[in-house]
Amino acid sequence: MSLRTKAPLLAVSALVSAFGFASTAYADAFYLQAQSARGAGRAFSGEAADTGAASLWWNPAAIAGIRDGSATLSATAILPKGDVVDTGTQICRPGQACTGISGQSNSRDPVNKGIVPSGAVAYPLTDRIAVGLAVTSPFSFTTNYDSDSWARYSADKTRLRTIDIQPSIGVVVTDWLRVGGALNVEYTDASLSNALPNLSAALPDGQQELKGDGWDFGWTAGVQLHNDFATVGISYKSSIRHNLKGDLTVSGLVGPLASSNTTVSGAKAAFNTPGQVIVAGRFRGTDKLTLNAQVVAYSWSKFDTIDLGAPLNTAIPENYMDSWSLAGGLDYDVTPKLTVRAGVQRTKSPTQDTQRDARVPDADRWTYAAGGSYQLSPRIALDAAAQYVDFENTTIDRVTAAYVGSAAQTNIITSGALRNASAVVLSLGGRVSF
Protein backbone atom coordinates (compact mmCIF):
# COMPACT_ATOMS: atom_id res chain seq x y z
CA MET A 1 0.00 0.00 0.00
CA SER A 2 1.39 3.41 -0.96
CA LEU A 3 2.01 6.32 1.35
CA ARG A 4 -0.75 8.18 -0.46
CA THR A 5 -3.23 5.44 0.41
CA LYS A 6 -2.00 5.24 4.00
CA ALA A 7 -2.64 8.92 4.72
CA PRO A 8 -6.47 8.66 4.79
CA LEU A 9 -6.17 5.67 7.15
CA LEU A 10 -4.22 7.73 9.68
CA ALA A 11 -6.52 10.73 9.48
CA VAL A 12 -9.80 8.81 9.75
CA SER A 13 -8.41 6.92 12.73
CA ALA A 14 -7.52 10.22 14.39
CA LEU A 15 -11.00 11.63 13.72
CA VAL A 16 -12.81 8.94 15.68
CA SER A 17 -10.21 8.71 18.42
CA ALA A 18 -10.64 12.45 18.96
CA PHE A 19 -14.20 11.94 20.19
CA GLY A 20 -12.92 10.52 23.45
CA PHE A 21 -11.37 13.80 24.56
CA ALA A 22 -14.74 15.03 25.75
CA SER A 23 -14.20 12.91 28.83
CA THR A 24 -11.53 15.13 30.32
CA ALA A 25 -13.93 18.05 30.11
CA TYR A 26 -16.79 16.43 31.97
CA ALA A 27 -18.15 12.97 31.30
CA ASP A 28 -17.62 9.27 30.76
CA ALA A 29 -15.33 8.76 27.74
CA PHE A 30 -17.10 10.67 24.95
CA TYR A 31 -20.59 10.79 26.53
CA LEU A 32 -21.52 14.26 27.80
CA GLN A 33 -24.02 14.33 30.71
CA ALA A 34 -25.10 17.98 30.53
CA GLN A 35 -28.74 17.43 29.56
CA SER A 36 -30.55 19.06 32.52
CA ALA A 37 -29.76 21.84 34.99
CA ARG A 38 -32.15 20.21 37.47
CA GLY A 39 -30.31 16.89 37.26
CA ALA A 40 -26.88 18.55 37.46
CA GLY A 41 -27.64 19.77 40.99
CA ARG A 42 -27.83 16.22 42.33
CA ALA A 43 -24.98 14.79 40.19
CA PHE A 44 -27.48 13.15 37.82
CA SER A 45 -28.86 10.77 40.43
CA GLY A 46 -32.46 9.63 40.01
CA GLU A 47 -32.97 11.12 36.53
CA ALA A 48 -34.55 8.00 35.00
CA ALA A 49 -37.04 7.92 37.92
CA ASP A 50 -38.07 11.60 37.85
CA THR A 51 -40.94 13.00 35.82
CA GLY A 52 -41.49 15.72 33.26
CA ALA A 53 -39.67 17.01 30.19
CA ALA A 54 -36.44 17.58 32.15
CA SER A 55 -35.96 13.80 32.50
CA LEU A 56 -36.99 12.88 28.95
CA TRP A 57 -33.41 12.22 27.74
CA TRP A 58 -32.91 9.51 30.38
CA ASN A 59 -36.32 7.84 30.24
CA PRO A 60 -39.24 8.50 27.85
CA ALA A 61 -41.61 7.05 30.48
CA ALA A 62 -40.94 10.26 32.47
CA ILE A 63 -43.66 12.12 30.53
CA ALA A 64 -46.40 9.49 30.83
CA GLY A 65 -49.41 10.79 32.77
CA ILE A 66 -48.41 14.46 32.81
CA ARG A 67 -51.42 16.74 33.20
CA ASP A 68 -50.07 19.87 31.50
CA GLY A 69 -47.70 20.66 28.71
CA SER A 70 -44.17 21.42 29.88
CA ALA A 71 -40.88 22.63 28.44
CA THR A 72 -37.35 22.96 29.77
CA LEU A 73 -34.25 24.72 28.50
CA SER A 74 -30.76 24.52 30.02
CA ALA A 75 -27.27 25.81 29.27
CA THR A 76 -24.14 24.36 30.85
CA ALA A 77 -20.76 26.10 30.95
CA ILE A 78 -17.84 23.63 31.16
CA LEU A 79 -14.58 25.07 32.49
CA PRO A 80 -11.88 22.36 32.36
CA LYS A 81 -8.26 22.45 33.50
CA GLY A 82 -5.42 19.93 33.33
CA ASP A 83 -1.89 19.18 32.23
CA VAL A 84 -1.01 16.70 29.48
CA VAL A 85 2.65 16.06 30.27
CA ASP A 86 5.47 14.36 28.37
CA THR A 87 7.32 11.85 30.57
CA GLY A 88 9.74 10.51 27.97
CA THR A 89 8.01 10.12 24.60
CA GLN A 90 10.34 9.21 21.72
CA ILE A 91 10.02 9.41 17.96
CA CYS A 92 11.79 6.73 15.92
CA ARG A 93 12.36 7.72 12.31
CA PRO A 94 13.50 4.99 9.90
CA GLY A 95 17.26 4.39 9.99
CA GLN A 96 17.78 6.89 12.83
CA ALA A 97 18.16 6.64 16.58
CA CYS A 98 15.05 7.32 18.64
CA THR A 99 14.94 10.84 20.10
CA GLY A 100 12.67 12.91 22.30
CA ILE A 101 10.04 15.09 20.67
CA SER A 102 10.96 18.76 20.48
CA GLY A 103 8.74 21.54 21.72
CA GLN A 104 6.51 21.98 24.73
CA SER A 105 6.68 19.11 27.21
CA ASN A 106 3.60 20.26 29.14
CA SER A 107 0.37 21.12 27.34
CA ARG A 108 -1.77 23.11 29.76
CA ASP A 109 -5.55 23.16 29.49
CA PRO A 110 -5.86 21.75 25.96
CA VAL A 111 -9.64 21.29 26.32
CA ASN A 112 -11.42 24.52 25.44
CA LYS A 113 -14.10 26.03 27.63
CA GLY A 114 -17.58 25.80 26.17
CA ILE A 115 -21.33 26.05 26.63
CA VAL A 116 -23.63 23.10 25.97
CA PRO A 117 -27.36 23.72 25.41
CA SER A 118 -30.21 21.25 25.87
CA GLY A 119 -33.98 21.36 25.89
CA ALA A 120 -37.17 19.32 25.84
CA VAL A 121 -40.91 19.74 25.50
CA ALA A 122 -43.78 17.38 26.38
CA TYR A 123 -47.56 17.53 25.91
CA PRO A 124 -50.40 15.23 27.08
CA LEU A 125 -52.66 13.83 24.36
CA THR A 126 -54.91 12.17 26.96
CA ASP A 127 -54.70 11.61 30.71
CA ARG A 128 -52.60 8.49 29.96
CA ILE A 129 -50.62 9.30 26.79
CA ALA A 130 -48.08 12.08 26.25
CA VAL A 131 -45.64 12.92 23.48
CA GLY A 132 -42.38 14.78 23.77
CA LEU A 133 -39.24 15.94 22.00
CA ALA A 134 -35.77 16.34 23.50
CA VAL A 135 -32.94 18.14 21.69
CA THR A 136 -29.53 17.60 23.25
CA SER A 137 -25.83 17.64 22.42
CA PRO A 138 -24.39 14.45 23.97
CA PHE A 139 -20.99 14.66 22.23
CA SER A 140 -19.61 18.22 21.91
CA PHE A 141 -16.16 19.60 22.67
CA THR A 142 -13.15 21.44 21.28
CA THR A 143 -9.49 20.72 22.01
CA ASN A 144 -6.53 22.82 20.94
CA TYR A 145 -2.91 21.74 21.39
CA ASP A 146 -0.18 24.20 20.44
CA SER A 147 1.61 23.47 17.19
CA ASP A 148 4.83 22.64 19.08
CA SER A 149 3.22 20.41 21.72
CA TRP A 150 4.83 17.02 22.39
CA ALA A 151 1.42 15.49 21.60
CA ARG A 152 1.07 17.11 18.17
CA TYR A 153 1.55 13.89 16.15
CA SER A 154 -1.60 12.37 17.67
CA ALA A 155 -3.58 15.51 18.54
CA ASP A 156 -3.52 19.11 17.35
CA LYS A 157 -6.94 20.73 16.92
CA THR A 158 -10.22 18.86 17.29
CA ARG A 159 -13.81 20.05 17.11
CA LEU A 160 -16.91 17.87 17.54
CA ARG A 161 -20.57 18.90 17.58
CA THR A 162 -23.57 16.59 17.79
CA ILE A 163 -27.29 17.23 17.82
CA ASP A 164 -29.52 14.44 19.13
CA ILE A 165 -33.24 14.79 18.33
CA GLN A 166 -35.37 12.43 20.42
CA PRO A 167 -39.12 12.23 19.62
CA SER A 168 -40.76 10.27 22.44
CA ILE A 169 -44.04 8.81 23.68
CA GLY A 170 -45.02 7.89 27.24
CA VAL A 171 -48.03 5.79 28.30
CA VAL A 172 -49.64 5.09 31.68
CA VAL A 173 -50.36 1.35 31.66
CA THR A 174 -51.65 0.94 35.23
CA ASP A 175 -51.77 3.08 38.36
CA TRP A 176 -48.24 1.93 39.20
CA LEU A 177 -46.63 1.42 35.75
CA ARG A 178 -45.53 3.92 33.12
CA VAL A 179 -43.76 2.96 29.87
CA GLY A 180 -42.10 4.96 27.12
CA GLY A 181 -40.20 4.72 23.87
CA ALA A 182 -38.19 7.08 21.68
CA LEU A 183 -36.21 7.36 18.46
CA ASN A 184 -32.79 9.01 18.58
CA VAL A 185 -31.85 10.89 15.41
CA GLU A 186 -28.27 12.07 15.73
CA TYR A 187 -26.27 14.45 13.52
CA THR A 188 -22.49 14.54 13.96
CA ASP A 189 -20.14 17.17 12.56
CA ALA A 190 -16.40 16.92 13.24
CA SER A 191 -13.09 18.40 12.16
CA LEU A 192 -9.58 17.66 13.33
CA SER A 193 -5.95 18.13 12.46
CA ASN A 194 -2.62 16.75 13.61
CA ALA A 195 1.04 17.06 12.63
CA LEU A 196 2.86 14.53 10.45
CA PRO A 197 6.61 14.02 10.91
CA ASN A 198 8.91 14.46 7.95
CA LEU A 199 11.81 12.00 7.68
CA SER A 200 14.31 14.52 9.01
CA ALA A 201 13.90 16.22 12.38
CA ALA A 202 15.43 19.34 10.82
CA LEU A 203 12.41 19.75 8.56
CA PRO A 204 9.12 21.35 9.68
CA ASP A 205 6.18 19.03 10.26
CA GLY A 206 3.57 18.25 7.68
CA GLN A 207 -0.11 18.53 8.49
CA GLN A 208 -3.32 16.61 7.95
CA GLU A 209 -6.87 17.85 8.42
CA LEU A 210 -10.13 15.94 8.15
CA LYS A 211 -13.71 17.19 8.19
CA GLY A 212 -16.73 14.90 8.18
CA ASP A 213 -20.36 14.53 9.15
CA GLY A 214 -23.25 12.09 9.12
CA TRP A 215 -26.78 11.24 10.32
CA ASP A 216 -27.39 8.11 12.41
CA PHE A 217 -30.20 6.48 14.40
CA GLY A 218 -30.78 4.75 17.71
CA TRP A 219 -33.60 4.21 20.19
CA THR A 220 -34.53 4.52 23.86
CA ALA A 221 -37.08 2.55 25.90
CA GLY A 222 -37.97 2.73 29.57
CA VAL A 223 -40.40 1.99 32.38
CA GLN A 224 -41.22 3.56 35.73
CA LEU A 225 -42.75 1.69 38.66
CA HIS A 226 -44.13 3.90 41.43
CA ASN A 227 -46.25 4.20 44.55
CA ASP A 228 -46.78 6.93 47.13
CA PHE A 229 -43.28 6.56 48.58
CA ALA A 230 -40.93 5.52 45.77
CA THR A 231 -40.36 5.52 42.03
CA VAL A 232 -37.98 3.16 40.25
CA GLY A 233 -37.01 3.90 36.66
CA ILE A 234 -35.30 1.51 34.26
CA SER A 235 -34.31 2.51 30.74
CA TYR A 236 -32.08 1.44 27.89
CA LYS A 237 -30.42 3.72 25.35
CA SER A 238 -29.21 1.75 22.37
CA SER A 239 -25.76 1.71 20.88
CA ILE A 240 -25.61 3.81 17.72
CA ARG A 241 -23.65 2.85 14.63
CA HIS A 242 -22.06 6.10 13.41
CA ASN A 243 -21.03 6.57 9.79
CA LEU A 244 -19.00 9.64 8.89
CA LYS A 245 -17.95 10.87 5.46
CA GLY A 246 -15.61 13.77 4.87
CA ASP A 247 -12.65 15.37 3.13
CA LEU A 248 -8.99 14.87 3.98
CA THR A 249 -6.12 17.24 3.21
CA VAL A 250 -2.46 16.25 3.70
CA SER A 251 0.17 18.95 3.16
CA GLY A 252 3.72 19.97 4.03
CA LEU A 253 5.42 16.60 3.43
CA VAL A 254 8.69 16.78 1.49
CA GLY A 255 11.25 14.45 -0.06
CA PRO A 256 10.13 10.81 -0.38
CA LEU A 257 6.90 11.66 1.46
CA ALA A 258 5.88 14.46 -0.90
CA SER A 259 3.70 12.10 -2.96
CA SER A 260 1.41 11.74 0.08
CA ASN A 261 0.37 15.40 -0.11
CA THR A 262 -3.18 15.11 -1.33
CA THR A 263 -6.80 16.13 -1.03
CA VAL A 264 -9.20 13.19 -0.79
CA SER A 265 -12.99 13.37 -0.83
CA GLY A 266 -15.21 10.65 0.58
CA ALA A 267 -13.04 9.31 3.42
CA LYS A 268 -15.28 7.06 5.55
CA ALA A 269 -15.27 5.60 9.04
CA ALA A 270 -17.82 3.61 11.06
CA PHE A 271 -17.88 2.93 14.78
CA ASN A 272 -20.28 2.13 17.62
CA THR A 273 -21.10 4.31 20.59
CA PRO A 274 -22.08 2.41 23.74
CA GLY A 275 -25.53 1.38 24.88
CA GLN A 276 -26.63 2.44 28.36
CA VAL A 277 -28.62 0.51 30.94
CA ILE A 278 -29.91 3.03 33.49
CA VAL A 279 -31.49 2.06 36.83
CA ALA A 280 -32.64 4.87 39.10
CA GLY A 281 -34.70 5.37 42.22
CA ARG A 282 -36.34 8.29 44.04
CA PHE A 283 -37.50 7.66 47.59
CA ARG A 284 -39.50 9.97 49.85
CA GLY A 285 -37.68 10.26 53.16
CA THR A 286 -39.98 12.89 54.65
CA ASP A 287 -42.55 15.32 53.30
CA LYS A 288 -39.65 17.60 52.35
CA LEU A 289 -36.76 15.19 51.63
CA THR A 290 -36.33 12.97 48.56
CA LEU A 291 -33.38 10.61 48.23
CA ASN A 292 -32.04 9.75 44.76
CA ALA A 293 -29.79 7.04 43.35
CA GLN A 294 -28.76 6.04 39.83
CA VAL A 295 -26.41 3.52 38.29
CA VAL A 296 -25.52 3.48 34.59
CA ALA A 297 -23.82 0.54 32.89
CA TYR A 298 -22.12 1.50 29.61
CA SER A 299 -21.38 -1.13 26.96
CA TRP A 300 -18.18 0.63 25.92
CA SER A 301 -16.75 -2.66 24.66
CA LYS A 302 -18.85 -2.03 21.53
CA PHE A 303 -16.27 0.65 20.72
CA ASP A 304 -13.76 -2.09 19.97
CA THR A 305 -12.74 -1.09 16.45
CA ILE A 306 -12.99 1.72 13.93
CA ASP A 307 -14.03 0.18 10.63
CA LEU A 308 -12.65 1.87 7.54
CA GLY A 309 -14.30 1.51 4.16
CA ALA A 310 -12.94 1.20 0.63
CA PRO A 311 -10.23 1.49 -0.54
CA LEU A 312 -8.67 0.79 2.90
CA ASN A 313 -11.06 -1.97 4.07
CA THR A 314 -9.49 -2.47 7.46
CA ALA A 315 -10.24 -2.03 11.16
CA ILE A 316 -8.33 -0.14 13.84
CA PRO A 317 -8.52 -1.62 17.36
CA GLU A 318 -9.66 0.64 20.21
CA ASN A 319 -10.24 -1.96 22.96
CA TYR A 320 -12.47 0.03 25.28
CA MET A 321 -13.82 -1.71 28.38
CA ASP A 322 -17.40 -1.73 29.65
CA SER A 323 -17.73 0.83 32.45
CA TRP A 324 -20.21 2.29 34.92
CA SER A 325 -21.19 5.32 36.95
CA LEU A 326 -22.90 5.40 40.34
CA ALA A 327 -24.58 8.51 41.76
CA GLY A 328 -26.46 9.43 44.91
CA GLY A 329 -28.16 12.67 45.85
CA LEU A 330 -31.03 14.43 47.56
CA ASP A 331 -33.70 17.08 47.02
CA TYR A 332 -34.92 19.11 50.00
CA ASP A 333 -37.90 21.47 49.90
CA VAL A 334 -36.82 24.39 52.06
CA THR A 335 -40.05 26.26 51.32
CA PRO A 336 -42.93 25.62 48.91
CA LYS A 337 -41.00 27.69 46.36
CA LEU A 338 -37.36 26.75 47.07
CA THR A 339 -35.77 23.29 46.61
CA VAL A 340 -32.07 22.65 47.22
CA ARG A 341 -30.10 19.67 45.92
CA ALA A 342 -26.76 17.95 46.34
CA GLY A 343 -25.12 14.79 45.04
CA VAL A 344 -21.97 12.88 44.28
CA GLN A 345 -21.08 10.59 41.37
CA ARG A 346 -18.29 8.06 40.85
CA THR A 347 -17.39 7.21 37.24
CA LYS A 348 -15.00 4.56 35.95
CA SER A 349 -13.20 5.24 32.69
CA PRO A 350 -13.52 2.75 29.81
CA THR A 351 -9.97 3.49 28.61
CA GLN A 352 -7.20 1.05 29.47
CA ASP A 353 -3.55 1.50 30.38
CA THR A 354 -1.28 1.03 27.33
CA GLN A 355 -4.28 2.01 25.13
CA ARG A 356 -4.71 5.66 26.18
CA ASP A 357 -3.42 8.45 23.92
CA ALA A 358 -3.33 12.24 23.95
CA ARG A 359 -6.69 12.42 22.19
CA VAL A 360 -8.29 10.26 24.89
CA PRO A 361 -6.65 11.16 28.23
CA ASP A 362 -9.66 9.86 30.15
CA ALA A 363 -9.51 8.91 33.83
CA ASP A 364 -11.64 7.71 36.73
CA ARG A 365 -13.27 10.63 38.49
CA TRP A 366 -15.51 11.94 41.27
CA THR A 367 -18.19 14.57 40.67
CA TYR A 368 -19.51 16.73 43.52
CA ALA A 369 -22.67 18.74 42.89
CA ALA A 370 -24.99 21.26 44.50
CA GLY A 371 -27.92 23.22 43.13
CA GLY A 372 -31.50 24.26 43.55
CA SER A 373 -34.79 25.33 42.00
CA TYR A 374 -36.97 28.36 42.65
CA GLN A 375 -40.64 28.50 41.68
CA LEU A 376 -41.12 32.00 40.29
CA SER A 377 -44.81 31.38 39.67
CA PRO A 378 -47.14 28.37 39.57
CA ARG A 379 -45.96 27.70 36.01
CA ILE A 380 -42.35 28.91 35.89
CA ALA A 381 -39.32 27.53 37.76
CA LEU A 382 -35.61 28.32 37.54
CA ASP A 383 -32.88 25.67 38.02
CA ALA A 384 -29.21 26.27 38.81
CA ALA A 385 -26.32 23.95 39.65
CA ALA A 386 -22.57 23.86 40.17
CA GLN A 387 -20.31 20.82 39.93
CA TYR A 388 -16.68 20.11 40.61
CA VAL A 389 -15.18 17.16 38.73
CA ASP A 390 -11.92 15.71 40.07
CA PHE A 391 -9.99 13.42 37.69
CA GLU A 392 -7.40 10.96 38.87
CA ASN A 393 -3.88 11.22 37.47
CA THR A 394 -3.31 8.63 34.77
CA THR A 395 -0.93 7.55 32.01
CA ILE A 396 -0.95 8.40 28.31
CA ASP A 397 0.95 5.51 26.83
CA ARG A 398 -0.49 4.22 23.57
CA VAL A 399 2.25 3.51 21.00
CA THR A 400 1.37 4.91 17.57
CA ALA A 401 3.03 5.20 14.17
CA ALA A 402 2.91 7.28 11.01
CA TYR A 403 3.06 5.75 7.51
CA VAL A 404 2.34 2.28 8.89
CA GLY A 405 3.57 -0.61 6.77
CA SER A 406 5.78 1.48 4.52
CA ALA A 407 9.52 2.02 4.42
CA ALA A 408 8.90 5.44 6.00
CA GLN A 409 7.10 4.06 9.07
CA THR A 410 7.84 6.37 11.98
CA ASN A 411 7.02 5.02 15.43
CA ILE A 412 5.90 7.26 18.31
CA ILE A 413 6.68 5.54 21.62
CA THR A 414 4.34 7.52 23.84
CA SER A 415 5.12 8.12 27.49
CA GLY A 416 2.95 10.82 29.00
CA ALA A 417 0.54 11.58 31.80
CA LEU A 418 -2.65 13.42 32.61
CA ARG A 419 -2.13 15.44 35.79
CA ASN A 420 -4.05 17.94 37.90
CA ALA A 421 -7.18 17.58 35.78
CA SER A 422 -10.46 18.99 36.99
CA ALA A 423 -13.52 20.85 35.73
CA VAL A 424 -15.95 23.39 37.12
CA VAL A 425 -19.39 22.93 35.54
CA LEU A 426 -22.10 25.58 35.89
CA SER A 427 -25.68 24.97 34.75
CA LEU A 428 -28.65 27.32 34.47
CA GLY A 429 -32.09 26.42 33.20
CA GLY A 430 -35.79 27.04 33.34
CA ARG A 431 -38.96 24.98 33.29
CA VAL A 432 -42.41 26.16 32.24
CA SER A 433 -45.80 24.44 32.18
CA PHE A 434 -48.65 25.42 29.87
Image (cartoon, rainbow, N blue to C red):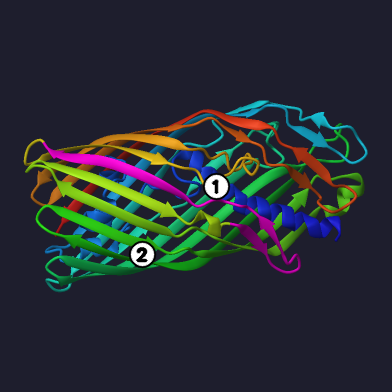
* Residue that badge 1 annotates: 20
Residue type for callout 2:
Gln
For the question of whether residue 298 can be seen, the reply is yes
Query: Closer to the camera, 129 or 428?
Result: 129
Q: Residue at x 51, y 54 (%)?
A: 300
Q: The magenta stretch spans which residues?
A: 304-333
- Give the crowd class for mark 2: few <14, some 14-19, many >=20 residues within 10 Å: many
Above or below, comparing residue 63 to residue 260 in the picture: below
Q: Nearer the viewer, mark 2 or mark 1?
A: 1
Q: Residue at x 19, y 43 (%)?
A: 291
Q: Residue at x 27, y 68 (%)?
A: 180
Q: Main secondary structure of the magenta part?
A: strand
Above or below, comparing residue 408 to residue 84 in the picture: below
The answer for how far apart the CA atoms under marks 2 and 1 are is: 23 Å
Residue 349: x percent and y percent? 50, 43
Chain-order first, disc 2 or disc 1: 1
Secondary element type, mark 1: helix
Relative placement, left or right, of 283 versus 390 is left
- Give the crowd class for mark 1: few <14, some 14-19, many >=20 residues within 10 Å: many
Residue 409: x percent and y percent? 84, 47
Secondary element type, mark 2: strand
For the question of whether residue 71 can be seen, the reply is no
Residue 181: x percent and y percent? 31, 69
Q: The C terminus is located in which quarter?
A: bottom left
Number of marks drawn? 2
For residue 166, the mark is: 2
Residue type for callout 1:
Gly
Q: Is residue 316 magenta?
A: yes
Relative placement, left or right, of 398 versus 344 is right
